[in-house]
Image (spheres, coloured by chain):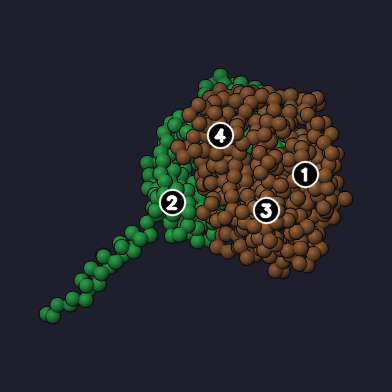
Chain colours: A green, B brown
Amino acid sequence: MKRNWTTPLFLSLFLVIVPTLLLGQNPEVKRERSFTGNGLYGFMDGGAEQYLEYGVSKLVTRDIVFKGEEYTIDIYDLPTAEDAFGIYSLHIFKCIDKDMQGCIDCLSTYQMQAVKGNQYVSIVFPSGTETARKNANELIRYYVKTDQKHTLTLPAELKLTMPYSLKVKYLRGPIALSEASLTLSKQLIGVKYSKIWFIPEKETKSFKALIYLVDKKELTKLKAETKESNIINEGNNFLYIKGIEAEDDSQEGNHDGFGF
Amino acid sequence: MYHHYYILTHKKTSMQRRKFVHSIALGGIGIALAPIVKAAAPEKSIAVKPTSNIQDALNIPRTNLSMPGKFPGKVVKINHPDCFINGKPSNDIAYEMVKTSMQKLTEKENLNEAWLQFVDPKDIIGLKVNPIGGKLLSTSHAVTKAVIKQLTEAGIPKANIIIWDRRGEDLDNAEFTAENYPGIKIMSTEYKDAKGNLADENGKFYSENEVDKNQYFYVDVDGVYDKETMPYMTNGGKNSYFTKICTEKVTKIINIPIIKNAGASITVCMKNLAFGSITNTGRLHQAMWHETCAYACAFPPIRDKVVLNIADGLVSNFDGGPGADPQFIYHANTLVVGTDAVAVDRICYDIVLNKRIKEGVQQKEKEGARIFMDIAQKLNLGIADKANIKLEEINLNV
């Protein structure tokens, strides 16, 4: 039988050329830095308090150039997928696309944010172009390996289905809570809780909050302080309540804060 | 987790300081990444304000150049829907936008004549940019280069043009560099040496030599800072000194701020001038923010030198300011131009407010958000009353 050399030749060319082309498309890292634990203050100073509230253990930040565009990609390691979602949920405002292909992500003009396992990922691209936005997806695939050990599970009480982005926030402490709702923040003064699933209803300026208390005593206390008509449900360690955002609890200062 | 709401409000100052230092430390795109922990509650207005030396400023006779300049209350707003190419503001379109607005403002068909209404070849002209938003949200190079090009076409030597701001680091991060602007001087009040230090071997900040100790804004509020913050304040105490860039080095200032929110208020012309020209500003952000925006502009180094304001709203934001949170940045595709910084601010305020309402960040105008403009009007620095502002709106390429 006559040997066909064409197939191995094409195969060899494929094996040589394709990786070369792909290599040419690899991100060029201009600067890479890692921060662990409280070292996060060295990177973001005051902003670190919010991240540390969620238990961020490590941040790797890279300034890169990819396909002619500049990006900064930050990958935060958190204890759980819920914590990663928590940080993510506080940092998204509006999305051009969200929760694409079953993932939890939010694409805006200048930023792609995503939750991958127990990691929160932010990619910023100053050009804000369509190309940059497409490339951001590639960068996530390049840098982030999905860890199936960590999957996001929302409590059944919330009765929520995908997409989750912009629908619910996960709060781990007072800094996150004050960011999400000053009304609830005030309501929970002196109450010991471990985590809160917070559903804002922008249209009606109302909210629902699934609050996990640290013990039965705290649960009893919060229940006593909450109008019965505002209690949606309760369990051994949680109280699911609703409320109205007070008009004067607007978080808008008259101007900016300290500094320049 | 124990929840103490009061801790948040009490911790505000330290958190704000950290936020500020962070913005300095990040640079580049990274400046956008500062996760902003919002102030826990809006400030309550303070009935009795600290005393200041504003009367000293008002006692100094005005000149024919004093704010609000040649065209009080006149504002040109120029829009172009396609002023971005591949995500960057187009130099050519920015040139056209600046040109058309200058012609409209001055009613001069000849562009050189229009510019020479405000400057002449003997002037040393300082372009006051706003670079604190890094690459994402700083005065655009397209507009800055358009201004420089038109100035040189009008006969101003490049050597007489200075791009300046308070912090050299911010200018670098936003790429206002000698490489990007050949022949133009880049200056700042605070700067680092080759080793990256803001102070010499004796611990003296370089910026101390760059401020004019004879020209200061006094407020009866003590600036007390930790060692990390002090290099960015230059001095503590009750005086805020004007930079020598304003007092000695330039004869005219063209203000090119960016249109940004500052909470429910804005930071555009007056804020850019006031807080960008003096030291020891940290103490002025609480009780005296509005007053400082207006009062500092009433002192001669600013009042008598600012001849033109070109508010750059090609890229703008509606929340997260004055930092650059990418979630709130958008293409506003506009420039707002006038000699009257107060009137320009008033028009820009509406741009930001309307966008905030449209995006659901706030539902209505917040009481007190325009106080600094009203103060400035009382000081005769310009017109804040919208009914008395003559707004000319131009839509290019429509």
Residue displayed at 72% across by 33% down: B215
One can see residue B294 in this view: no
Q: Which mark is residue B312?
A: 3
Q: Which residue is mark 1?
A: B304
For badge 1, the amino acid type reads Asp
| Residue B99 x, y percent position in the rendering | 71, 63
Viewport quadrant of the C terminus of chain B: bottom right
Q: Residue furthest front?
A: B122
Secondary element type, mark 1: loop
Q: Are marks 2 and 3 on the same chain?
A: no
> From mark 1 to mark 3, how far is it between C-alphas?
22 Å
Mark 4 residue type: Tyr
When the figure is inspected, residue A104 is found, relative to residue B11, above or below; the finding is below
Q: Which residue is mark 4?
A: B206
State the CA–CA distance, disc 3 to disc 4: 30 Å
Task: State left or right for residue B379 relative to residue A112.
Answer: right
Disc 2: CA contacts within 10 A as few (<14), some (14-19) or many (>=20): many
Secondary structure of residue under mark 3: strand
Could you tell me the amino acid type at mark 3? Asp
State the separation of the CA atoms marked 2 and 4: 33 Å
Query: Along the line of sight, which residue is nearer the eye, A86 or B238?
Result: B238
Q: Are marks 4 and 1 on the same chain?
A: yes
How crowded pointer 3 is (Cα within 10 Å; few <14, some 14-19, many 20+) is rated as many
Relative to residue A21, is residue A177 drawn left or right? right
Q: Chain of mark 4?
A: B
Reading the image, the residue beneath label 2 is A64
